[in-house]
Image: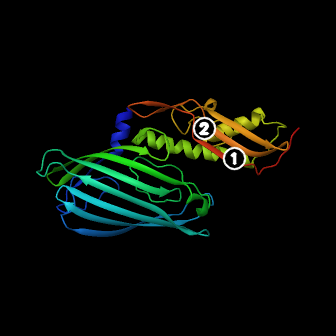
Amino acid sequence: MSLVWRLLLPLLLVVPAFAQEDAPYFVTYDHHLEEPGNLELEMNSTIGVPRSGQRAYFAPFAEIQYGVTRWWTSELYVEGQSTAGDSTVFTGWRLESRFRPFAAEHAINPVFYVEYENINEASRIQKEIVGKAPLAFQPNSELSQAHAHELEAKLILSSDVRHWNIAENLVVERNLSENEGFEFGYAFYIYNNLVAAVDNGARYAAYRTYDSASTTPTSAFNAAVQNMVVYGQPTTGTKPIAPGLGTGNVVLSPTFTNSVPTGMQVSLSGYQLNAIFKTFTLNKPVATYPFLGVYAPP
């Protein structure tokens, strides 16, 4: 299956058409806007029961939608989350607007969408159309300090065909907190996977027994960390977490203080990220953890 179809198929939904604005989509939008002057308040939530011993969480968010004009609908999202055995935190807000340039019904009805996000890493809201990535499970006190400012745009193409609605959403995102360029749906999904993989590799290195007397790790230690990033396990696998990612793209940089290891940094180098319309060469993400393992030099 081509890359273009892998991007478009998850965004293509066909459902019975509704006379009202509310369609049974989860994250996809159609061309029906809120009636002018109407104010709608809606409460939603995400409840997570993770595996592997991670803590359950409850993440509610409030949606306030207002029909500004016949061609403009605006929405405000306010969110938070509570993790069992941890704490309850405010995770941020999102402001979006949808603009329909043509009031009359057409075979294909375009709508332009723009959203600004001001959230932190503790967010658990499953509202992204561009894919998903493993969640970070550090304490909320740490996650809530890492903020992200993102701008998202969509081209919504929607049609009512008899009793059915066909809607396609094409997405592009820009992370305003980092100099990462524009990322499209497929690229954003891959990059999120890379962030989680590098973080997992650095955490693994921080708790593993370090068996070298210098900042140059032994080949076995280095290979285990590289495999953890690429395959999600310390041994060689067959399917990397991102297309084209290899162990040669993973760089492990231990730090020493007073002749003992004190930190483990893992980063990517020279990875080619295919963003459909452009290819980026990544020398990041980077993750660093304090060394908490056993130091056992030869």
**Front residue of this view, candidates 194 and 16:** 194
Question: What is the secondary structure assignment of the residue under circle 1?
Answer: helix
Question: Looking at the picture, how far across and down is residue 253, in whole percent?
Answer: 71, 37
The residue labelled by disc 1 is: 204
Compared across the picture, whether 279 is left or right of 83 comes to left
Mark 1: few/some/many CA within 10 Å (<14, 14-19, 20+): many
Compared across the picture, whether 261 is left or right of 166 comes to right
Question: Looking at the picture, how far across and down is residue 201, in whole percent?
Answer: 65, 44
Question: Which circle's residue, 1 or 2, is located before the other in the chain?
Answer: 1
Q: Quadrant of residue 232?
A: top right
Q: Amino acid at mark 2?
A: Val
Question: Looking at the picture, how far across and down is residue 142, in whole percent?
Answer: 61, 59
- Is residue 48 among the parts visible in the rendering? yes
Residue at 35 percent across and 54 percent down: it is 27
Q: Amino acid at mark 1?
A: Tyr
**Front residue of this view, candidates 275 and 232:** 275
Residue at 29 percent across and 55 percent down: it is 97
Q: Are marks 1 and 2 in contact (CB under 8 Å)?
A: no
Question: Looking at the picture, how far across and down is residue 17, in whole percent?
Answer: 19, 56
Whole-angstrom CA distance, mark 1 to mark 2, is 13 Å
In the image, is residue 26 above or below residue 106? below
In the image, is residue 53 above or below residue 40? above
- Which quadrant does the N terminus fall into? top left
The residue labelled by disc 2 is: 230
Compared across the picture, whether 202 is left or right of 133 comes to right
- Which quadrant does the C terminus fall into? top right
